[in-house]
Amino acid sequence: MLAYNIIKTYTVIMSYSQLRAFDAVARSGSFSRAADMLGVTQPAVSLQVAALERAYRTDLLTRKGATVSLTADGATLFGLTRQMFGVEAEIEDFLGSSLKLQRGHLRFAADGPHLALDLLAAFRASHPGVTVELILGNATETWNALLQSAADIAMLANPPEDPRVAALPVAVQDMMLLVPRGHALAKRGEVALKDIVAEKVVFREHGSNTQRTLERALRKQRLHLFPVLTVGSREAMIEAVSRRIGVGFVFDREKNADPRSVAVPIRELRGSNRNMLVYLKPRRRRRTVAALIEIASKQPVAAQ
């Protein structure tokens, strides 16, 4: 079987070389000019064409001195080789443009849109030919998308350590207490977790980075908060607080310009959100992933 595969591979390589030699002669009308085009000797071109004719028992060229002309079979084959090498040139152009990132596709997962879109805006400005699929989810969903290769790379806050995954720091954010405008705590320049104990609170879902970060801080302070509502998105958090259902929690880049609520820094949770660009280590070889990492490292997204 091994000998058969070697012979088969050799035959395929020889057939390609023979077809390229024939195509060059047909295009140039001369063995010497074909040799110059291919960067080989004239005898090598002659031998390749002769081997092709002998292998398929047909005359492809009529030789008259230093010039050649195509036979009927040669003319038909020349039409086919033009198609063949034309497609080859298109393939080279396509792969070359992918290498230069004139085209391509990137699957980018994130546990929040704000920093992710800032980074993607910079990426798209540098590589407008690359299409991007943005996959949004909570922290658990984003991490799973990365590990299951549903995403090529991800923006994730406070990711777990994993030997399979490399991480690049992008930004640091504070956790904020979100309160309705006019609330007593809205006038503070900063609040402590103990100031919130008596408040009605709105929590994020258990798998979110916001909730996990808050719960770690509460355990450390030996404090307990009892939610009146649990919501599954930042948008729902903002709406719930604006409707005075309770006070809530967001990171500083998540607070929009909604005039119905105010965000106040939480003392124990300043700098608690470390946004990282994370990727499975073998993915670094992908041009789109490497390009995004390069942009993130040279143009860090400002968090404050």
Image (cartoon, rainbow, N blue to C red):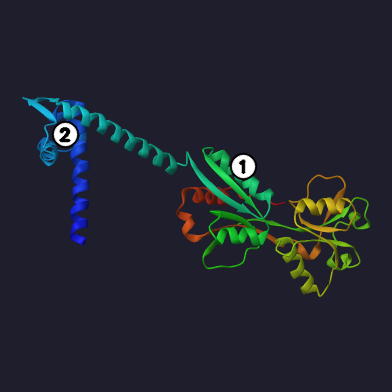
Quadrant of residue 94 in the image? top left
Numbered circles on residues, count = 2
Q: In this view, does 224 lie above or below 129?
A: below
Residue 7 coordinates in the image, percent (x, y): 18, 54
Q: Name the residue: 66% across, 60% down.
A: 139
Locate residue 260 relative to residue 39 in the image: left or right: right
- Residue 193: in sight, yes or no? yes
Q: Percent from the top left, x then y, of residue 145?
A: 59, 58
Task: Report whether 22 appears left or right of 194.
Answer: left
Q: Can residue 271 be seen by looking at this rendering?
A: no
Q: Callout 2, which amino acid?
A: Ala
Q: Is mark 1 on a helix, strand or loop?
A: helix
Q: Assign the N terminus to one quadrant of the image.
A: bottom left
Taking depth in this image into account, of 272 and 107 the one nearest to the observer is 107
Q: Which residue is at a point 81% across and 75% down the rendered structure image?
A: 222
Tell which residue pokes out farthest to the bottom in this image.
222
Q: Position of residue 38 (x, y in %)?
A: 20, 36
List the residue tagged with mark 2: 35
Say which element carries label 2.
helix
User: What residue sits 21% from the left and 47% below the top?
Assistant: 13
Q: Which residue is drawn at 85% across and 68% down?
A: 226
Q: Nearer the viewer, residue 125 or 147?
A: 147
How crowded pointer 1 is (Cα within 10 Å; few <14, some 14-19, many 20+) is rated as few
Instruction: Tell me: 139 left or right of 23.
Output: right
Picture coordinates of residue 36, whole percent (x, y): 18, 32
Q: Which residue occupies the foreground of this view, 285 or 6?
A: 6
Q: Which of the 4 image quadrants contains residue 250?
A: bottom right
Which of the numbered marks, if any, corresponds to residue 121?
A: 1
